[in-house]
Image (spheres, helix red, strand yellow):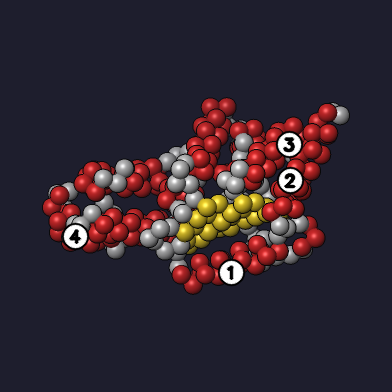
Amino acid sequence: MANGSRQAVWEFFGTELKRRREKAGFSQAGLGAAVFVSGGYIGQFELAIRKPQLDVAQRIDRVLQTDGIFERLCRKLIDDPRYADYFAQVVELERLATLICEFAPTVVPGLLQTKEYARAVTIAANPFKTDEYVDEIVTARLERSLILSDATRPEYWVALHENVLRIPVGGPLAMAGQLDYIAGMMRDRTAMVTVLPHTTGAHAAMNGDLRLMEFEDAPPVAYTETSFSGTLVDVPAVVKRAQRAYDLLRVATLSPEVSLTLIESAAEDFRRCASTT
């Protein structure tokens, strides 16, 4: 994991710790005494100067009654082997986000993938891995999507390049099912999905996947990803540039109504293709 990405996660840890500590009415010294470290250590955790050990994070969760968030940030966020090193830290931030905006130029975003689509993408990227490995990756991806069915789910905006609708990942029938699933999420108002048509041509955000996340009481972050690496950014000036690029992108996409019609039409095209093969 890149040092910059790791540091961004610990900075989020510190910001969230300070917010929840103050909300619970603890001083740094008071919380430190309750979890058997010094108040100075708590201050260093909040400034991301020092990283807490797992048992300290677990005690913080118990004292602040935070439902395991700090343990997960220590244990699962950074060390979960089911995710690439450069992506692992993003997974926990998704669970905390109040708003997620994504641009996907080539592949359906993980939060919207069906099991069949996720399996096809995973096998394509890992052609020599065992079925057990593939199943583990697919299960992890589907677990991520559960945040969209939660009562406190984030507001979720997705801009898909039209390319995503035309590539028959997993075959025509699987692709039809994937597009039907996206259409259902749109009709249920779980996700706001729009399509960037081929006719738009070049666009500033087209160099790779882009994700923006906002939180209740922490600064926004941006995440960019290419085929083999990803970067989590929390530098305000860079995040602002990413937000502007996404705003320009959203202006260029089709309306939600027209996008839904295009997605449903593409699904029907794949069904017809499957019936003739």
Mark 4 highlights which residue?
A: 28
Q: Secondary structure at mark 1?
A: helix
Regarding residue 127, the answer to whether it shows in the image is: no
Q: Residues within 10 Å of mark 1 (few under 14, many from 20)?
A: some
Residue nearest the observer in this picture, 143 or 155: 155
Circle 3/circle 2 CB separation < 8 Å: no
Mark 1 or 2, closer to the camera = 2
Q: Residues within 10 Å of mark 3 (few under 14, many from 20)?
A: many
The type of residue carrying mark 3 is Ala
Mark 1 highlights which residue?
A: 244
Residue at 29% from the left image edge and 63% from the top image edge: 47
Q: Earlier in the sequence, mark 3 or mark 2?
A: 3
Mark 2 highlights which residue?
A: 263
Q: Earlier in the sequence, mark 1 or mark 2?
A: 1
Residue at 71% from the left image edge and 57% from the top image edge: 255
Q: Which mark is residue 176?
A: 3
Residue at 47% from the left image edge and 49% from the top image edge: 94
Circle 4/circle 1 CB separation < 8 Å: no
Q: Position of residue 136 (x, y in %)?
A: 51, 32
Q: Earlier in the sequence, mark 4 or mark 1?
A: 4
